[in-house]
Image (cartoon, grey):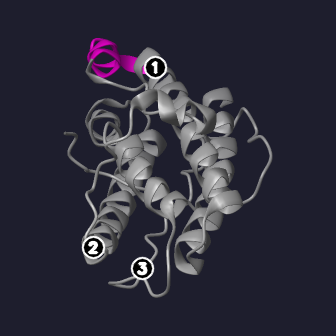
Amino acid sequence: MRRALVLVTVFAVGACGAEPRNQAPTPPPATTAVTLPATVDGAYNGTDLMFLQMMLAHHEPAAALLELGRSRATRADVRGLAGDLATAQAAETRAVTDWLEAWGKPLTSDAHPDAHAAHGGLPALGDKEIAELGRLGGAEFDTAFLNMLIGHQHGAVELARMEATGGQNPQVKALAARTDETVRAQIQQLLRMVAG
């Protein structure tokens, strides 16, 4: 069974556009930890349950990735991003864990991994990828970390869209809508950071 460590990335992004090359990069905006209610009201369906379980599984490996970013990145904006994301995700993980426990449901899905292929599948980021990243240093590490985080976060968008089209519970659907919007914005910010 996988242990749920981290959930949804909620990231508020500021102005768009490339930064001038002759200026130091602007630190990314701080992540916003959304306060979620302790319990979820109303009925829920299998899609709501799967979304919450799969988001926990999807972000589980992000804890190690973000810790590497916090401790190994050479750029201050990359270190700050990793720390802010880790804080926001940990808060949301606790809340969503409480939701699942209030429903009397497990934190992990017992469905076969191939059952989730149509909406992004289970996480591809694992110990091997984290270990390979950990062997890098300097600017090479920063670029690889940002690219790995970009790739990983695309899965969160797919899961959020699955919930938007098939979910029933208004609070879970609202979380999915916020996830879709903020993670897409975060990906754009990360792309600008890679280019910078």
Residue 22 visible in the current orientation? yes
Query: Would you place residue 150 above or below residue 26 in this image?
Result: above
Label for residue 36?
Answer: 3
Whether tag 3 and tag 1 are in contact, CB under 8 A, the answer is no
Instruction: Name which residue type carries label 2.
Output: Asp
In depth, the one of 149 and 170 nearer the eye is: 170
Q: Quadrant of residue 94?
A: bottom left
Apparent side of residue 51 relative to residue 164 in the rendered image (left or right)? left
Residue 195 x %, y %: 68, 28
Label 2 belongs to which residue?
98
As helix, strand or loop, the secondary structure at mark 1 comes to: helix
Q: Residue at x 19, y 39 (%)?
A: 1
Label 1 belongs to which residue?
139
Instruction: Name which residue type carries label 3.
Output: Leu
In depth, the one of 169 and 192 nearer the eye is: 169
| Quadrant containing the C terminus in the rendered view | top right
Whether tag 2 and tag 1 are in contact, CB under 8 A, the answer is no
Q: Residue at x 51, y 67 (%)?
A: 45
Q: Residue at x 41, y 20 (%)?
A: 141
Residue 62 x %, y %: 35, 40
Residue range highlighted in magenta:
128-139
Q: Quadrant of residue 130?
A: top left
- Cα gap from disc 2 to disc 1, whole angstroms: 39 Å
